[in-house]
Image (cartoon, helix red, strand yellow):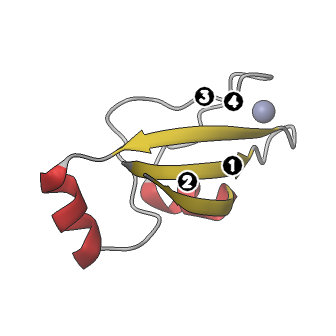
């Protein structure tokens, strides 16, 4: 399971989807943190322009326009 994010690139407006798989440990931690928490260690990039979408938690959250649980 995990979370699917629909992210609108603020650089070029392209909407892409990011599948964030969650193991048991991160599911537990997710319950205690912001719903749009995402890992920033690995760059998520816009497929159209290459702009990094998760330079920071705040930057990522600002570009998310939809998120859904994925079983
Ligand atoms: Zn882009």
> Up-down: is 68 above or below 52?
below
Q: Is residue 12 above or below residue 63?
A: above
Counting residues from the start of the chain, the first of labels 1 and 4 encountered is: 1
The yes-or-no answer for disc 4 within 8 Å of ligand 1 is yes
Q: Are marks 2 and 1 in contact (CB under 8 Å)?
A: yes
24 sits to left or right of 69: left
Instruction: Determine which residue is flagged by label 2.
Output: 60
Q: Residues within 10 Å of mark 3 (few under 14, many from 20)?
A: some
User: Mark 1 near mark 4, Cβ–Cβ under 8 Å?
Assistant: no
Report the front residue among 52 and 22: 22
Q: Are marks 2 and 4 in contact (CB under 8 Å)?
A: no
Quote the CA–CA distance across marks 1 and 3: 10 Å
Residues at discs 1 and 3 in contact (Cβ within 8 Å): no
Residue marked by disc 3: 45
**Side of 25 where 39 appears, left or right:** right
Label ID, residue 46: 4
Q: What is the tally of numbered marks visible in this picture?
A: 4
The percent coordinates of residue 55 (x first, y second) are: 49, 43
Residue 7 is labelled as: 1
Secondary structure beneath label 1: strand
Residue 38, horizontal then vertical, whole percent: 40, 52
């Amino acid at each position: 399971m995990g979370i699917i994010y629909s992210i609108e690139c603020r650089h070029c407006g392209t909407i892409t989807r990011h599948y964030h798989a969650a193991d048991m440990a991160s599911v537990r931690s997710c319950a205690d943190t912001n719903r749009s928490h995402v890992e920033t260690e690995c760059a998520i990039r816009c497929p159209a322009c290459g702009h990094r979408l998760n330079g920071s938690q705040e930057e990522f959250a600002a570009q998310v326009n939809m998120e859904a649980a994925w079983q």
